[in-house]
Image (tube, rainbow, N blue to C red):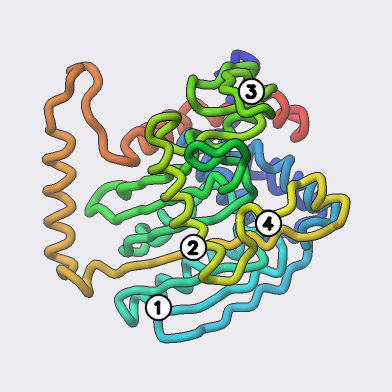
Amino acid sequence: MSTDVKHIPEAVLRAEVQRFLTGAGARAEDAEQTTRALLHASRIGVDSHGVRLCRYYADLLQAGVMNARPTRVMRRTGPAAGVLDGDDGLAHGASYQAMDEAVDMAATCGIGAVGVVHSTHFGAAGAYAVEAAHRGMIGLVTTNSLSLVSLFGGGIAFHGTNPIAMAAPVPDSRPWLLDMATSSIPFNRVQLYRSLGLSLPEGTAVDAQGHPTTDPARASFLQPLGGPEFGFKGAALAGVVTILSAILPGATLDPDILPDAQARQRREPANIGHFFIAIDPARFVGRTGYDAAITRYLEVLRASPAVDPKRPVMAPGDREWAEAEKRARLGIPVDPDTLKALGL
């Protein structure tokens, strides 16, 4: 992190971000849910998808691209399936609602799936997956997004960064938590690095001519997960996300989503899609069996010998929950551009 960041207590940051979003036209309840999702990311160290995004959402609200007064409609299409229309509003409230619906279905049927259409950028996918885990369910979340990632060997952007998140409950512990883009890095990290004046890692981004670059100011789009040699894996996973998030619910395909500048000019919503799955372990191996197995799995995993004894192996989520404890003590680091926007 740059030395220009300031560490802000979470309670102060929550109030300021909610104030900022309502000032941009968001309803109080939408501002609260959006702040909730942003703080999830900032709390665990995913700063690219944390409170810095409040400026982006405020811009879309004020430009009329995002509906400041959405009327969300949930439609059950089967005992364990449904589609939620987000009415082009802030996506975070719709996403929490969709996962709540999926969990309720899973409580009855063992599994529940909800697709979301007419939505927008929803921040960190893990914010919603972890909600299922807090209710004793396994949560799986995907979203498609604007084309920012090349295909393997491709010379233009095609897929979005198309993240996959999964959370699993663990007895007497924080959830197992995976939240990953199917691109080399999220594009929001490029924008964060621009703000912080940092160079990008090798093999993650390319310029407008398709040449690799580590300069975030020159980065036009990203490479798929796996980079120049194994990017076919990331590109295929991005396709999985597009099928679940866009094709199944009926949202816009990645390459057909308008770039922000065109969307503002036309005042045309993005119609991004998300997909939420909740699974009740009690309906499969049983709650007792599940609890014993995942406890044993994580014990064996964390006890696995490390190459460097000073850097023990970790399960997905271990690093993030440790960072959350650190930031609870020291405050959440906020980049200079966001500090200025919030007046902090």
Residue depicted at x 12% and y 56%: 292
Q: CA distance from mark 4 to mark 1?
A: 32 Å
Mark 1–mark 2 CB contact (< 8 Å): no
Point out the frontmost of discs 3 and 1: 3
Q: CA distance from mark 1 to mark 2?
A: 22 Å
Q: CA distance from mark 4 to mark 3?
A: 25 Å
Q: Earlier in the sequence, mark 4 or mark 1?
A: 1
Look at mark 2 in the image and give the residue it sits on. Answer: 243
Task: Return the mark for residue 256.
Answer: 4
Percent x, y of residue 233:
38, 43
Q: CA distance from mark 3 to mark 1?
A: 43 Å
Secondary element under disc 1, as helix, strand or loop, is helix
Secondary element under disc 4, as helix, strand or loop, is helix
Percent x, y of residue 261:
81, 45
Q: Earlier in the sequence, mark 3 or mark 1?
A: 1
Along the line of sight, which residue is nearer the eye, 282 or 271?
271
Look at mark 3 in the image and give the residue it sits on. Answer: 216
Q: Amino acid at mark 3?
A: Pro
Q: Amino acid at mark 4?
A: Asp
Q: Is residue 187 left or right of residue 40?
A: right
Q: Is residue 100 above or below residue 163?
A: below
Q: CA distance from mark 2 to mark 4?
A: 14 Å
Displayed quadrant of residue 342: top right
Q: Earlier in the sequence, mark 2 or mark 3?
A: 3
Q: Quadrant of the C terminus?
A: top right
Point out the frontmost of discs 1 and 2: 2
Q: Is residue 281 left or right of residue 237?
A: left
Q: Amino acid at mark 1?
A: Met
Q: What count of labels does the image hold?
A: 4
Look at mark 1 in the image and give the residue it sits on. Answer: 105
Residue depicted at x 55% and y 43%: 39
